[in-house]
Amino acid sequence: MRRQTAWTVAIIAVAVAGAIGVAAVMTDGARDARPTASPAFASPGPSETATPAPRPTPTPTSTPTPTARPGTALIERAGDGRVRMLVAGDSLTAGFFATTKDRGFIQLVADGIGSVDVTGAAQAQQTLSTVAAVTDVPADVGVAVIELGTNDVGVPTPLADFEQQYASLLDRIRSTSPRAGLLCLGTWTADGAAYDEVISRTCVAHAGVYVSLADAFANAEFHGPAGRDTFAGAGDEFHPNDAGHRAIADAVLSALTY
């Protein structure tokens, strides 16, 4: 009975061991049968475009503000580059006695500046008060050339009255065109020193530049000869000839920054 029991126990042990072995094999088989996980890949997306580095905004080059050369008046130009030139004068401003009007000093100055519109008044044998009364002063004057006083010397106009009249004309110019270049020419005579002093002082007080004509008048080559043919009739010994007008124009242009 004990031997049968022992065999029974042995058989059961073998059966259990076999079952465990089968289970182990099945377990390993199940483990081996598990699907292998696929490697993870990022889903393809749009390729990134490199962002360009911002370009620095170029700094605009500023246009330098023109300044007048020492001792000169600066011409104020319009946006298109043109210049409105105001003139107020007597027979010299009218071009007497150049051969042609184009050789008068005002036209020579305009040619030197370039792109000029001339406005104003020029009357032969007239004093400052008369010419000033008929001179319209526009609001866009770029340069003003005042050539008055010679006939006041001959009248003569009292100096105090002359100074008041001259200052009044320059006040009108400065009130309408405060930035205009202002030139005040001296008298064309050997006897005008006292009037020249008034012109110079009043002009400087109005931020203008005084231009003496004394040396040009004293040069005999800038006058005559009497009887020469000109656009305004026979020339005399007093008024400038072509060379005289050229000398006046050169003095005016030298006193301007343009």
Image (spheres, grey):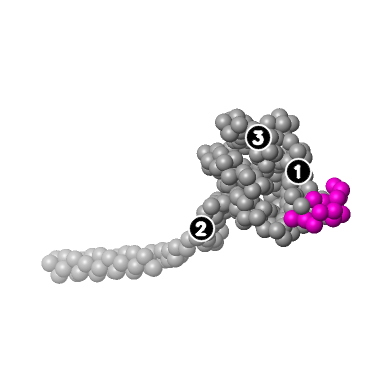
Q: Is residue 231 magenta?
A: yes
Give the residue displayed 60% in from the left and 50% down from the top. 212
Task: Tell me if I can see residue 187 in this picture.
Answer: yes
How far apart marks 3 and 1 lie (CA) works out to 17 Å
Image height of 186 relative to 3, above or below? above
Specify whether 176 is left or right of 64: right
Residues 126 and 77: in front is: 126
Specify whether 243 is left or right of 255: right
Range drawn in magenta: 223-236
Estimate the x, y position of residue 84 in percent, counting from the top left: 70, 43
Location of residue 29 by image quarter: bottom left
Give the residue displayed 71% in from the left and 41% down from the top. 89
Q: Which residue carries the number 1 mark?
A: 91
Q: Residue furthest left?
A: 2
Give the residue displayed 64% in from the left and 33% down from the top. 157
How far apart marks 2 and 1 lie (CA) works out to 61 Å
Residues tagged 2 and 1 counted as in contact (Cβ below 8 A): no
In the image, which is nearer the foreground, mark 3 or mark 2?
Answer: 3
Image height of 228 relative to 9, above or below? above
Q: Label 3 amino acid?
A: Pro
Element on which disc 3 rests: loop
Q: Which residue carries the number 3 mark?
A: 156
Location of residue 93 by image quarter: top right
Give the residue displayed 16% in from the left and 65% down from the top. 5
Q: Label 2 amino acid?
A: Pro
Residues 88 and 192: in front is: 192
Residues 197 and 121: in front is: 197
Q: Looking at the image, is mark 3 or mark 1 earlier in the sequence? A: 1
Count of numbered badges drawn on the protein: 3
Q: Which residue carries the number 2 mark?
A: 56
The N terminus sits in image quarter: bottom left
